[in-house]
Amino acid sequence: EKYSSYSSEIIRLSLVGIAGYGFIISNILMKTLELSNKPGDTISKMSLPASNFIISVAGVAFFGISLGLSLYHRFRITSCLYDQILISRSLLRLKNSHWTETEKDAEKQVLAKIRECQKIESRRYENILFWSGLFLFAGFFCIVILFFLILTDLF
């Protein structure tokens, strides 16, 4: 549940970051371009620093990657829950007295395989959340840099 809520927060923050870029582009960059543009100039003559454009694209890409990884995590975490249900059922089967020893040995082998799969998957999903958080941080870092560049250009 904690992993699930953590990925939900990353999804929310990624969406807020993407909305932040929409705000920057619509309210700050476009108005700056309108002010710097003289009447009669075409859009191709507008002066927008290439660094601002590159940082904007990189930031949106970082947020998009973070969002995608978190959504993938949310989708695939159900397989870990399924593995946990299988483990619980296997443990209940082992407690029943009407099973033979060969059936119990076969169930123990299945249980060991399921536990190993769950261990591998949980590590994989932990790494996915780590990278998602890292891309989220990189996206917010790009927003801070972009605000700084825009403010230094304005003043």
Image: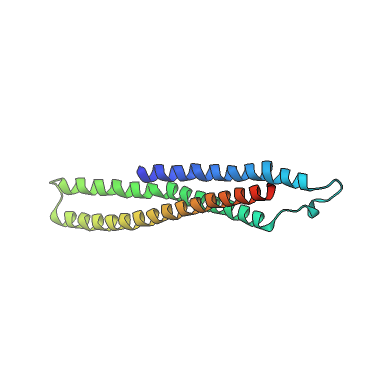
In the image, 66 versus 108, the foreground residue is: 66
Q: Is residue 137 left or right of residue 42?
A: left
Q: Is residue 114 left or right of residue 27?
A: left
Report the residue that reaches farthest toward the front.
155
The residue depicted at 13 percent of the width and 55 percent of the height is: 101
Q: Is residue 46 left or right of residue 4?
A: right
Q: Position of residue 78 (x, y in %)?
A: 38, 46
The residue depicted at 46 percent of the width and 54 percent of the height is: 134
Q: Position of residue 13 (x, y in %)?
A: 50, 43
Q: Position of residue 99 (x, y in %)?
A: 15, 49
The number of numbered badges drawn on the structure is 0
| Residue 5, quarter of the rendered image | top left
The residue depicted at 83 percent of the width and 51 percent of the height is: 42
In the image, 93 versus 140, the foreground residue is: 140
Looking at the figure, which quarter contains the N terminus?
top left
Q: Position of residue 14 (x, y in %)?
A: 52, 46
Image: 1 above or below 112: above
- Model colouring: rainbow
Image: 50 above or below 30: below
Q: Is residue 72 left or right of residue 152?
A: left
In the image, 119 versus 135, the foreground residue is: 135
| Residue 112, quarter of the rendered image | bottom left
Report the residue that reaches farthest toward the right.
40
